[in-house]
Image: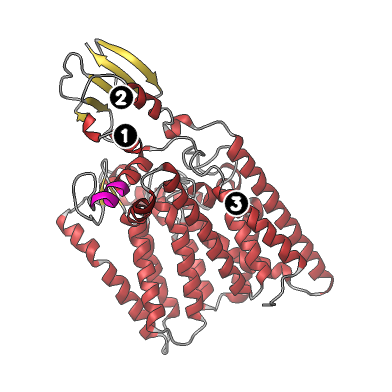
Amino acid sequence: MKARLSRIEMLLLAASLLVAIAYFKDVPNNPVGFFVDEASIAYNAHTISKNGSDEYGHVFPLYFRAFGEYKSPVYIYALSALFWFTGPSIFASRLLSAVAGLTGAVFLGFLGARLANRRIVGFIVFLSAALTPWIFEISRLVFEVALFPALLALFLLLLYRATRNEQWSWLIAAALGALLGLMFYTYSVGRLLAPFFALGFVFFFTRRRWRGVVLTWAVFGLTLLPFAIFTLRYPGALSERFKHVTFVKPEHTRAEIFGRFVQNYVMNFSPRSWAISGDPEPRHHLPWMGSLLVGVVILAVLGIGVVLAWHRSEAWWRFVLYGLAVSPIPASLTLDHFHTLRLIGLPIFLLVLTAPGIEFLLTENGEWGIARRRILTALVIAILLQGAVFQWRFRVSPPRDDAFDSYYPELLATALRRPERPIHLLDKTPAAYVYAFWYATLHNVNVNNFRRASIDEPISHGTLVIGHELPCTNCEIIMERGQFRVYVQK
C-alpha cells in the first residue's frame, strides 16, 4: 500500500472521522431510558467493582444469575473494570458499547485493506460497517452482544494474518483459541457459533499447518473447562432461557421442527429484512429502515459472486462463506423473526464480503474499468447518504419510552420522597426490581430501602409499593406511568 494518501483517500478519511464522532454523540441519552437488561448488567458490574460479588453475593461468578436466565460474563466484567475507575453511570455503560462498536468497524476496515492490499478498500469497508444500522444500534445498548462484533472482527483479522503463513506460530494459534473462548463467553449465541467457527478450521488443515490448527482447538477446549464445571454444578441453568424462546418442543415432530428451522433460516437471508424492514423489535432497531444499507447489500452480494467465481479454492474465503452460512443458525432456532442480537454474526461476514466486491469494481480494465469505478462511486455515495439519513432519523425520532421504560426514574423519585419504608417492589415478572436497585445506586440511595415482594403475599395497610403490570385493589395511586404505578396500600 502507498505511504501517502490520495485525494480520494483523504476525503474518505475525513468522512471516517465524522462517523467516529457520531458514535460518541448523545451516548447516554439516545436511546432515552435504560432497559431492564441494561440495568441488570450495569448493577451487577457495579457490585463486582465494589466488592467482587454479584447482586446475590456470589464472588466473581462465571455467569450472572438474572431473572429466569444467566447473563454472560465478559461484558459485565469489562464494565466493572470501567466502573472501578469512573463509578457507576449510564454514560460510562453506554460509552463502553460505543467504543466496542467503533472498534469492530475499525478492525473490519483493517481487514478490508489487507484483503485487497489497498487502503481505499479499508476506508470503504470501515465506513460501510460504522454506518450500518445493525452495528450502530447495538453500540447504543448496554447488552452483552455489544462486544461480539469487535471480537469476531479481530478474530477474522488475526485468522487472515495466520493464513498468510504456511505454518502457524504457537502465539497466533493460542490467540485464535482464546478469541474463540471469549466469543463463547460473551453472548449466548457464541456458545453455538464459537464451536461452529472452531469446526471451520478444517479448511486450514494441511500437512504443514495441522499443528497450529490442533493447538487452536486445544486452547479453545481449555477455555471451555469453566463452562463444563458450571454446567455440572448447575445443570440446565444456561438452557432455561432457550426453552422459552425456541420452537423446539417435545410435542413437535422432527419434521415440524426441521421445517420451521428451514423457514426461519431462509427468512434470515431475506433482502427485504436486510435492506427495508429490519428487526421489528423497537428496542433493537429504529422502525422504517432496514438493518443493512442498500449499498452494503449490493457490495456483499457482488463479493459473494466474486469469491465463488475466482476464490472458491482458497481456504480463507471458504471459511468466510462457511461463517456466513452458520451465523443465522442460533437465531433460526428461536421464535422471533429476524432478531438483531441473535443474528449478530451475519452482518460481520457480509461486511467482510464487501471487500472483494469493492476490489472488483476498482479493477482498471479499459472502458469496463471506468464503468466499474463509476458504479463503485455511486454505491459509496449511496452508503454515505443513506447512512447520514439513518443517523439523522436516529436522533430526531420520538423517544422509545415504552421500549426503554424511560419514565422509571421519575416514578422512583416520587416513591423516595414518601416517608414509608421499605418500598415494596411488586413485579408481574421477576425483572423490574433491578430498575430500583440501579437508579438508587446512581443517586447514592441504599438498596435496603427496598423489599422485593411476592405477588402471592398480602400487602399490609400503609405499605408503599412500586408495582409493575399488576392492578392494585383498595389502594391510593400516587403516580402511574406506562407499565408502572406507585401506590399506597389501604
Please, what is the three-letter code of the amino acid marked with disc 1? Ala
Q: Which mark is residue 21?
A: 3
Secondary structure that dominates the magenta span:
helix
Q: What residue is shown at x 39% (from left), y 29% (from top)?
A: 409
Is residue 435 found left or right of 116 in the rendered image?
A: left
Cα gap from disc 3 to disc 1, whole angstroms: 31 Å
Label pair 3/2, CB-CB below 8 angstroms: no
Q: Please state the extent of the stretch shown in magenta in the rendering.
A: 45-51
Cα gap from disc 2 to disc 1, whole angstroms: 9 Å
Q: Which mark is residue 415?
A: none
Q: Secondary structure at mark 1?
A: helix
Residue 439 to residue 415: above or below: below
Q: Residue beneath label 2, please?
A: 416
Is residue 426 found left or right of 255 in the rendered image?
A: left
Please, what is the three-letter code of the amino acid marked with disc 2? Leu
Foreground tag (3 vs 2): 2
Q: Secondary structure at mark 2?
A: helix
Label pair 3/1, CB-CB below 8 angstroms: no
Badge 3 crowding class, 10 Å Cα cut-off, few under 14, some 14 to 19, many 20 or more, is few
Residue 48 on the magenta segment: yes
Q: Secondary structure at mark 3?
A: helix
Residue 121 or residue 324, whichever sits in front:
121
